[in-house]
Amino acid sequence: MLLLSKAVFALMIGFFISLICALLFIPVLKGMKAEQSLSTYLRDAHQKKQGTPTMGGIIFIVATMISMLLLYYFKKITFNYSILIIFITFIGYGLIGFIDDYLIIKKHNNKGLTEKQKLLFQLIISIIFFYLFMISGNEPLLWIHTFHIKIDIGWLYGVFILFLLLASSNAVNLTDGLDGLAGGLSVIAYLTFGIIAFQTGWLEGYETVGCFCFILVGALLGFLVFNVSPAKVFMGDTGSLALGATLGALAILTRHELLLIIIGIVFVIETCSCILQRYYYKLTHKRLFPMAPLHHSFEKKGWNERDIVKLFWIIGLFGSMIALAFGVWL
């Protein structure tokens, strides 16, 4: 009951601070003319989005960090290696996205950071992650909890960390194409990891990690007030990269790396649709889907944007329920 009270309290703090941050940041982003470029292939359907500011991820990133600092100040949480790893990932990837968004806005095209520059920053974060992970007493093991299997992969776990952070951050980034889609799916995913974290009693600072998840859920709900259709702000790479990479970090810290595939099932489907589209086109010079990522195919078929978002939210919720059943209770 105490953990439930903490979760609700953390969620409420995140929500209200996020609302305040949104009211402060959205006018600033509009004043900066931080507009997102429209897709050439969906320009007519998304014309109404013209002029909507991006970089909105700063809203829930700042709200989450302020909320965590407030809880720490009032001695409701403690800092430890686990939460330090999460902070470095969350802020680090948010900063990569922020720089990328800023360069795109400044240049008035879709050319932000180069792939090599992004990879360099991501590699630095992964090295710091792996170092802190190992000195905090963790072992480089892949766990499959349901079947009680542990696989020691040694130093290759560092490579695995880089891969998982890259994959999860890019997956959320690809999914962020409709109003409220990535934000709503992230609420479901972080809610799930919050429950898992509170059940992971062996994890150093598990209550703090759980509180972080619920604070971010609240912050995302506050952001979604302004992000659901018709959106008044987009999260941009600032938000999507931070959200995706931190999901990967939570999967590693709670030792539920493989379960992330089920929790983030929609992110996985969206990413796979892009990969399949690309290689199918190379082989046949034909498109497998009307458009990738998959949510745009539904748009091409004439689906309403809100209906697509609702469908994908339901799929994400169903995936998380399956993950909780197999990852926590068995």
Image: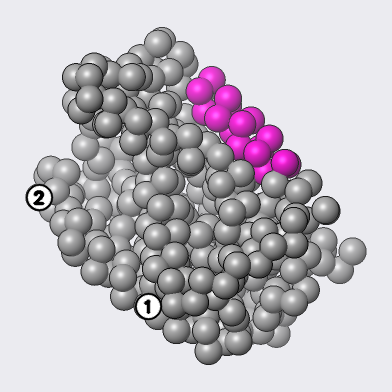
Depth order, front residue of 322/70: 322
Instruction: Reply above or below: 196 against 80.
Output: above
Q: Earlier in the sequence, mark 1 or mark 2?
A: 2
Mark 1 surroundings: few (<14), some (14-19) or many (≥20) residues within 10 A:
some
Outermost residue to the bottom: 135
User: What residue is pinned by disc 2?
Assistant: 107
Q: Is residue 144 visible?
A: yes
From the viewer's perspective, is 328 left or right of 250?
right
Q: Nearer the viewer, mark 1 or mark 2?
A: 1
Q: Is residue 222 visible?
A: no
**Span of residues in magenta:** 307-322
Could you say where residue 253 lies in the image, as x and y percent from the top left? 59, 70
From the viewer's perspective, is 201 left or right of 303?
right
- Residue shown at 78% from the left, 65% from the top: 199
Tally of numbered discs: 2
- Residue shown at 68% from the left, 52% from the top: 192
Residue 316 among those drawn in magenta? yes
Where is residue 46, by image quadrant? top left
Mark 2 surroundings: few (<14), some (14-19) or many (≥20) residues within 10 A:
few
User: What residue is pinned by disc 1?
Assistant: 127
Outermost residue to the top: 302
From the viewer's perspective, is 50 left or right of 289?
left
Name the residue type under label 1: Ile
Find out whether the residues at labels 1 and 2 contact each other: C-beta distance under 8 Å: no
Where is residue 102, by image quadrant? bottom left
- Residue shown at 33% from the left, 51% from the top: 237
> Disc 1 versus disc 2: distance between alpha carbons?
31 Å
Outermost residue to the left: 107
Q: Secondary structure at mark 1?
A: helix
From the viewer's perspective, is 274 left or right of 252?
left
